Image (tube, grey):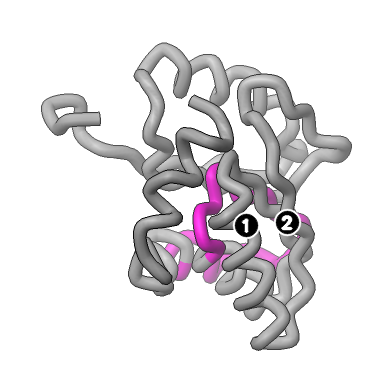
């Protein structure tokens, strides 16, 4: 799966997702002091934008250049500072540690997801959190 693979579904409509953050960040992040956050496979950026509105310093990464461009536009329209990156998550290495890493519904094979979790886990600060939400294994990828 590369940028071309992910650009295809994003190129089929003006917005692929709802534009609303997932329900998990507000309830989990509410008790945390804002710091640095990394949003893995951020798509069109709804969670990254929500985190930035809560005072987090956000880096958001996705395979799709189309999705990242939409996220950048949304951040600009809302006067939010988020660092967006188009990157292959299999090889991209964060340049810093984060107080929070979020990853929601990363659509890759289970082995690849496990690989990414193990590779990114050391990027969480000592008192930080790594929040991941995915589909039940009985559901299609």
User: In the rendered view, does 48 fall on the left or right side of 20?
Assistant: right
Label 1 Cα neighbours within 10 Å, binned few <14 / some 14-19 / many ≥20? many
Q: Nearer the viewer, residue 75 or 118?
A: 75
Q: Are marks 2 and 1 in contact (CB under 8 Å)?
A: yes
Residue lying farthest to the bottom in this orientation: 78
Asked if the stretch drawn in magenta spans residue 16, the answer is: no
Q: Quadrant of the C terminus?
A: top left
Which image quadrant is residue 78 in? Answer: bottom right
Asked whether residue 38 is drawn in magenta, I would say yes
Above or below, comparing residue 86 to residue 83 in the picture: above
Q: For numbered disc 1, what is the local secondary structure?
A: helix
Instruction: Give me the residue at 76% from left, 39% from top.
Output: 125
Q: Is residue 114 above or below residue 19?
A: above
Q: N-terminal of the two: label 2 or label 1?
A: 1
Q: Is residue 81 above or below residue 140?
A: below
Vertical relation: 35 (above or below) 116:
below
- 58, 141: nearer the viewer: 141
Residue nearest the observer in this picture, 70 or 109: 70
How far apart marks 2 and 1 lie (CA) works out to 7 Å
User: Measured from the top left, where is residue 96 in percent x and y?
Assistant: 86, 39
Question: Which residue is under mark 1?
Answer: 68
The residue sitting at 78% across, 64% down in the picture is: 57
Q: Which residues are magenta?
A: 26-45
Q: Label 2 crowding class (10 Å Cα cut-off): few <14, some 14-19, many 20+?
A: many
Callout 2: SS: strand
Q: Give the residue drawn at x 53%, y 36%.
A: 4
Residue position for label 2: 84
Examine the rendering and report whether any part of residue 62 can be seen. yes
Residue 69: x and y in percent read 64, 62
């Amino acid at each position: 799966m590369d940028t071309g693979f992910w650009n295809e579904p994003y190129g089929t409509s003006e917005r692929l997702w709802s534009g609303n953050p997932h329900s998990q960040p507000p309830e989990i992040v509410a008790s945390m002091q804002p710091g640095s956050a990394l949003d893995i496979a951020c798509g069109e950026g709804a969670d990254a934008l929500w985190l930035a509105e809560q005072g987090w310093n956000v880096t958001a990464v996705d395979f799709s250049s189309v999705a990242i461009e939409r996220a950048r536009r949304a951040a600009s329209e809302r006067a939010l500072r988020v660092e967006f990156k188009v990157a292959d998550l299999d090889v991209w290495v964060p340049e810093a540690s984060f107080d929070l890493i979020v990853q929601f519904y990363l659509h890759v094979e289970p082995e690849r997801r496990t690989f990414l979790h193990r590779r990114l886990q050391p990027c969480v600060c000592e008192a930080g959190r790594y929040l991941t939400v995915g589909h039940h294994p009985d559901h299609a990828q």
